[in-house]
Image (cartoon, grey):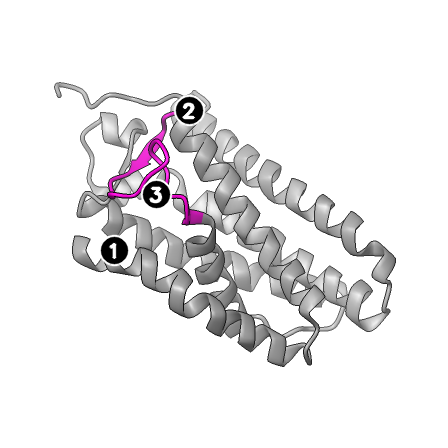
Amino acid sequence: MRRFFSIYQYATPAVFFPLTYWLWLNRYHGNHAFVLFLLAIPIVFSYVIPALGTNWLGLWEINTRVRLGKFRPHHGFLFGTGTSLLTFLSFDSPEFSFSGLFRSALVLASVLGFWNWIYDIYAIDCGFITAYNQSYADGKGAEAIATEHAPVYFGTFGFLYGLMLNTAQHYLIDLGRISLYWPLLILFIAISLVFPSLAYIGLSFLRHGHSGLKPFEKIGG
């Protein structure tokens, strides 16, 4: 399984990023600007948050050969590609309404929360990722360790990403409000960085009585 992750981390951005870009470009009829908009959000998110979590807070590390500290230099394109491809397969561009927004948010929260949780369980189990959280300190297994962060973090991101894509499509594509391109992109990236982190911190306080922003050593080891 560890060999799979070692290959996957390079194959995904090298092979599937161009494919994902082409799929989105085809859906939006050659609109490169909008495709870059929707790809930029998960790519920036998965550079900033993991870089801070590994190299600044020391909450986890990726046990692979090519690293910048405890972090992969291509991590943003790895997660960004996977997120964008899963989104392409599950986001059907619903109408801009309360029900459409909620459906987009709920679908992507479920899809991204679930598959990233599964990914992290197996990555932690085979030693490809080490997460120094409360469950790790308590000597629990990979499922418990991954459950500390993956569902809430990626689920919250997915929920927000669904709202963002629906909103961006309405204003930038349907209404042609191109002047909103950069304000929306900056706002959405900021939201994607802040609110999943707040959700994780809040859930950590409910579970353990602390923020979850401090690395833990394994008890007795």
Mark 3 and mark 1 lie on one chain; the one further toward the N terminus is 1
Residue beneath the point at 37% across and 38% down: 71
Specify the amino acid type for callout 1: Phe
Left-right relation of 4 to 28: left
Residue 5's label in the rendered image is 1
Q: Nearer the viewer, residue 10 or 170?
A: 10
Q: Residues within 10 Å of mark 1 (few under 14, many from 20)?
A: some
Q: Which residues, given as a range, are shown in magenta?
A: 57-75
Q: Label 2 belongs to which residue?
A: 57
SS at badge 3:
helix
Tell me which residue sits at (37%, 63%) in the image: 12
Q: Is residue 51 above or below residue 98?
A: above
Write down the quadrant of residue 129 in the picture.
top left
Q: Position of residue 6 (x, y in %)?
A: 24, 54
* Residue 135 location (% of width, % of height): 27, 31
Query: Can you identify the residue that label 3 sits on?
Result: 147
SS of the residue under disc 1: helix
What residue is shown at x 40% (from left), y 45% (from top)? 150
Front disc: 3 or 1: 1
Q: Could you give the CA–CA distance between mark 2 and mark 1, rounded to whole angstroms?
A: 24 Å
Q: Quadrant of the N terminus?
A: bottom left
Cα gap from disc 3 to disc 1, whole angstroms: 19 Å
